[in-house]
Amino acid sequence: MRRAKQPKLTAESEFTRLDLFPEDPWESAYLRFETPEQEIQKFVKRLLKLGAKEWPRESEIVELFCGRGNGLQALRLLGFTRIEGADFSASLLAQYRGDARCHVCDCRQLPFLDRSKDVLIVQGGLHHLQLLPDDLAQTFAQMHRVLRRDGRLVIVEPWLTPFLKLVHFACEKPIARRLSNKLDALATMIQHERRTYEQWLGHPRLVLALVHEHFAPVWQSVSWGKWSFVGKPR
């Protein structure tokens, strides 16, 4: 059996082995929320909905906050080859098994040249930012700097819809958590990111104002507890 390829971590981190990192409660819950196969299939369907079918296959794409790299795997399944990943967590990136180049970095200071990428993707990372509006404004400014003039920014983040309020209600019920490992994992993640999570959900107008300052909407929607946005640089 061939040994799986290690991710190409750049010089921002010297670590590639998972056993070198202490266990993080949030990351442990994230890993049991859904299997890699389930997450990859979810991302494939989501990216197609967000327009990936129309993107040129030679597009240079970066997934920010890419975690264990299942979004990169989804992009590969869709036929894209010029892909990269970026995340603040070296331990999550160490679990990626693919040939995309991965960067351990801060999204407020991206390690890419100006106007060098065609598509930037964020699937559930912006709500981890510590300070609003400062961190979000810096992140959007960096995205705007990196994207080519005709590039696309794709964002999917939690949004406080009636459905998400119902999910939050269920997360507070011990019996519901005992009956559903997925719900228990979600409740654990919320518990360990509560400050930034609630900060994000509590400022929808601020989030929209900041993203629209840098990007003109091409398509967006709010449904089932998610905000989906596709935009182009202004």
Image: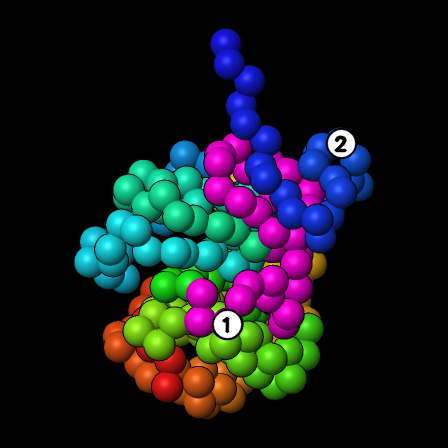
Q: Residues within 10 Å of mark 2 (few under 14, many from 20)?
A: few
Secondary structure type for disc 1: loop
Residue receiving disc 1: 114
Q: Is residue 86 left or right of residue 12?
A: left
Residue 90 seen in render: yes
Dominant secondary structure of the residues highlighted in magenta in the image = loop
Q: Is residue 229 above or below residue 100?
A: below
Quarter location, residue 18: top right
Residue receiving disc 2: 19
Q: Residues within 10 Å of mark 1 (few under 14, many from 20)?
A: some
Q: Nearer the viewer, residue 204 or 122?
A: 122
Q: Is residue 126 above or below residue 181?
A: below
The three-letter code of the residue at mark 1 reads: Asp
Q: Residue at x 53, y 67 (%)?
A: 113
Quarter location, residue 123: bottom left
Q: Residue at x 68, y 43 (%)?
A: 91
Residue 198 seen in render: no
Secondary structure type for disc 2: helix
Q: Earlier in the sequence, mark 1 or mark 2?
A: 2
Q: Is residue 131 above or below residue 50?
A: below
Q: Is residue 191 left or right of residue 145?
A: right
Tell me the distance, in whole angstroms, between the alpha carbons under discs 1 and 2: 36 Å
Q: Which residues are magenta?
A: 87-116
Q: Residue at x 44, y 71 (%)?
A: 115
The C terminus is located in which quarter? bottom left
Q: Are marks 1 and 2 in contact (CB under 8 Å)?
A: no
- Quick check: is 98 in the magenta stretch? yes
Q: Position of residue 150 (x, y in %)?
A: 30, 73
